[in-house]
Amino acid sequence: NKYILFNSDITGYSNIYIMDMGNERVKNLSNSKDFEFWPRWSQKTKKILFCSIPFSTTGYKKSKIWIMDDEGKNRIKLTDGENHNDFFPNWSPDSKKVVFQSNRDGNGEIYIMDGDGKNVKRLTNNNFEDSYPSFSPDGKKIIFQSQRLKKIQIFIINSDGTGEEPLFDEKAMTQIDLATSAFSLRPNSRAPKYIVGDNNEFCPNFSFDGEKIYFIMNNYSTPPQIYEYDTKSQTIRKFSAIAKDKSLFKDDYVFVSPDNKKILISTLSDKDYMRRRMSFISTSDFDDRKIIVDWDCNIWFPSWMNY
């Protein structure tokens, strides 16, 4: 877990960077005026998925999905089209498929395609905004967030587009107090379905062993914070929003390390709510948060590389 990918606007444009955690060396893989973001590493192909919005003198155009190597070279465009956006791609575990969000048919829906951009297939079909899809470690499921009933909820679907259902149970989650540090879904329901009330769930990610799901939750009266759902015990735990130095954080994106021991976070601190920093927190010590990239700029969508 030595290398980290992220995008930052430190140059004035959103570029993609690779960081060696051993010596803190950082390399810009983009060096362009295009708005490039959401880098995702493939262990199998050694390629990086990312989104790119071309820059023009009349403004930015539509987001498309690309791949490149870890030197920022050999770029290949996977999606095309002037009238729609393609966002948030993620590799399948075997890197043969890519799941992503697109509004090519109107609103945001979940799609899947081959790793070379061919054979695009639509997986969801509704009037809601579905986004942030990612695969389960066995490649059989896809988890995503969906804005329904005026709330954002986590849903899960088979990778062939069948069996779509909410992740958490309504009765078990309706009265959740986001101020509590730990609570259980048992014995209220056999399997969790979905969250209701004022609670909103964002950006779900499986751990690499598939036993945990990490996500952001808030009700717009408390800071967005990280939660861990244990798929075996059906319990949820909240990570502390207060670091050991008493800083208060608002978290808006999480990504789990390949060894399941750390979580990368794009976060805002009460010391400076004007810029996002990159921090990580231990999955065994929810209070042990450390800022690892603290530039005078914004940092978004960090992810681990695993050579």
Image (tube, rainbow, N blue to C red):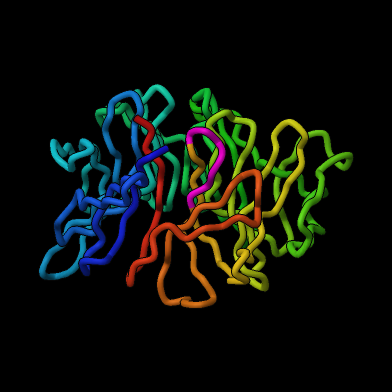
Q: Position of residue 29 (x, y in %)?
A: 20, 48
Across and down, in percent, residue 230 comes to: 70, 38
Q: Quadrant of the N terminus?
A: top left
In the image as oriented, which residue stretches furthest toward the right?
A: 187
Residue 252, relative to residue 47: is it above or below?
A: below
Q: For residue 299, what is the image quadrant?
A: bottom left
Task: Check the picture and name the quadrant holding the C terminus.
Answer: top left
Q: Residue at x 65, y 52 (%)?
A: 286
251 relative to 205, above or below: below
Residue 262 covered by magenta stretch: yes
Residue 52 image point, x, y percent: 24, 51
Where 231 falls versus 109 (above or below)?
above
Q: Is residue 90 left or right of residue 172?
A: left
Query: Which residue shows up at 13% across the image and 36% down it?
Result: 74
Q: From this viewpoint, which residue is outermost toward the left?
A: 57
Residue under the point 78% across and 60% down: 180
> How many numbered discs, if any?
0
Instruction: Return the residue nearer the eye: 188 or 165.
Output: 188
Looking at this view, is 221 or 208 the one in front? 208
Q: Where residue 104 sits in the image (x, y, percent)?
A: 33, 47
123 horizontally vs 282: left or right: left
Q: Is 74 above or below relative to 183?
A: above
Q: Which residues are magenta?
A: 258-264
Q: Which of the 4 quarters of the picture holds residue 205?
A: top right
**In magenta segment, residue 206:** no
Relative horizontal placement of residue 21, taking residue 76 as reference (left or right) = right
Residue occupying image coordinates x 43% and y 57% = 292
